[in-house]
Amino acid sequence: MAIRLGNNCQNCENLKADKVCKVHGVEVSGNYTCDQFEMKAALKDDRNCTTCLRYEREDCANPQHAAPGMMCASWAPNRVRA
């Protein structure tokens, strides 16, 4: 199963910092989307050991080498929400 970004308000450039839609003027969340959806031009891509769910845990694939700024093939986002 592939993982993709959703066409929802969290990934829309019309979402303001206070979670209010610039187009509709209402508070929204990641559960919403609309026909005026505009994908953010740039998403934060900060993938390294300190942003990995497994960093400094027993299930880290490379515990001897894991350090801030390093990257490996077993990286998993540390802010997982399902």
Image (spheres, rainbow, N blue to C red):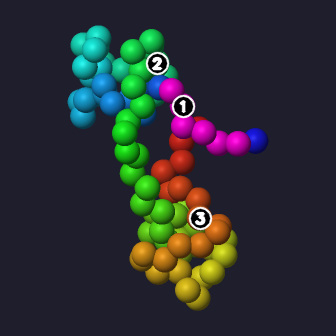
How many residues crowd around disc 2 within 10 Å: few (fewer than 14), some, or many (20 or more)?
A: some
Locate the C terminus by quadrant.
top right
Above or below: residue 80 compared with residue 27: below
Would you say the residues marked 1 and 2 are in contact, meaning their CB atoms lie under 8 Å apart? yes
Counting from the top left corner in percent of width and height, residue 33 is at 46, 18
Q: Quick one: 78 or 57, which is closer to the camera?
A: 78
Q: Main secondary structure of the magenta part?
A: loop
Q: Amino acid at mark 3?
A: Trp
Identify the secondary structure beneath mark 1: loop
Q: Position of residue 35 (x, y in %)?
A: 45, 12
Is 32 in the magenta?
Answer: no
Which residue is identified by label 1? Answer: 6
Q: What residue is shown with label 3?
A: 75
**Count of numbered marks:** 3
Q: Position of residue 49 (x, y in %)?
A: 49, 71
Mark 1 / mark 3, whichever is N-terminal? 1
Q: CA distance from mark 1 to mark 3?
A: 21 Å
Q: Is 5 part of what is drawn in magenta?
A: yes
Is residue 10 in sight in this rendering? no
Amino acid at dot 2: Thr
Q: Which circle marks residue 38 in the picture?
A: none
